[in-house]
Image (tube, rainbow, N blue to C red):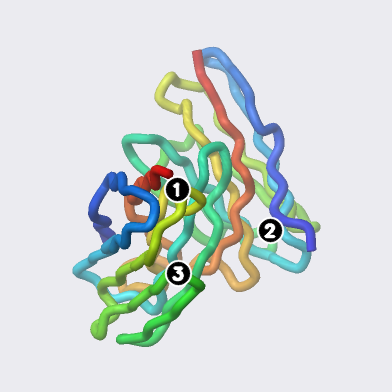
Amino acid sequence: KAGVTQTPRYLIKTRGQQVTLSCSPISGHRSVSWYQQTPGQGLQFLFEYFSETQRNKGNFPGRFSGRQFSNSRSEMNVSTLELGDSALYLCASSFLGTATGELFFGEGSRLTVL
Amino acid sequence: TQLLEQSPQFLSIQEGENLTVYCNSSSVFSSLQWYRQEPGEGPVLLVTVVTGGEVKKLKRLTFQFGDARKDSSLHITAAQPGDTGLYLCAGAGGNTNAGKSTFGDGTTLTVKP
């Protein structure tokens, strides 16, 4: 069974640009959640999508958005990048959703904003 | 906001030693997970505990869920260099968790050969 796939693994952007990250969940999983991981803040929940609907959202500004497609693949977008957006962005796949706890993470997309 | 506090934050030990990592909260969770994350990788699920007082063993790792389902511990016996990594606890299904998992800040473990 293939795991969670995130692309790209690494990317460098400059302030003001926008970025789109992609996540393909484990086959059969309908929930995809996104997390931002930084040394100072740990894992911070961004949002969860379940069957193409945003089911939950964390405390991030509107520059952070996401969507989920009918095949459960998900994308997240960050517009008007700031230096503080540099982080590891993790996607997690789950059969029942984040409320049940058992999450399967991808390897992450490492974003550096210069 | 539910917080999960992990201690210690950093731990550096010699191969063969035992260690315990703690995960504490003032809130009740329906379940609690432990993950291990290696540099450059995503967290990997190790175990889920659901019942208060539950103890689960995974080879040299022993996980315990507190009776009140507010805290948990991870004990590693005879640690090996391969145990090195960031250990994260996460609580799910709490009263104010708003349908998401809440993660602790993690314990960075280094096991020296």
Q: Is residue A87 above or below residue B2?
A: above
Q: Position of residue B59 (x, y in %)?
A: 50, 72
Instruction: Measure how far apart labels 3 and 1 are at the Cα level.
Output: 14 Å
Q: Quick check: marks 3 and 1 in contact, CB under 8 Å?
A: no
Q: Amino acid at mark 1?
A: Thr
Label 1 neighbourhood size at 10 Å, few (<14), some (14-19), many (20+)? many
Q: What is the x, y in percent for residue B31?
A: 41, 76
Q: Position of residue A36 (x, y in %)?
A: 47, 41
- Residue extending furthest left? B26
Q: How far apart, in angstroms, are the residues tagged by discs 1 and 2?
A: 37 Å
Q: Are marks 2 and 3 on the same chain?
A: no
Confirm whether residue B1 shows in the render: no
At a point 45% along the width and 78% down the height, the residue shown is: B57
Badge 2, how many Cα within 10 Å: few under 14, some, many 20+?
Answer: some
The residue singled out by tag 3 in the image is B60
Residue A53 appears at what percent x and percent y?
63, 59
**Amino acid found under the numbered disc labelled 2:** Glu
Mark 1 or 2: the one toward you: 1
> A1 and A92: which one is in front?
A1
Q: Is residue A76 above or below residue B61?
A: above
Which label number is shown at residue B84? 1
Residue linked to disc 2: A52
Q: Secondary structure at mark 1?
A: loop
Please say if A94 is above or below B103.
below
Mark 2 belongs to which subunit? A
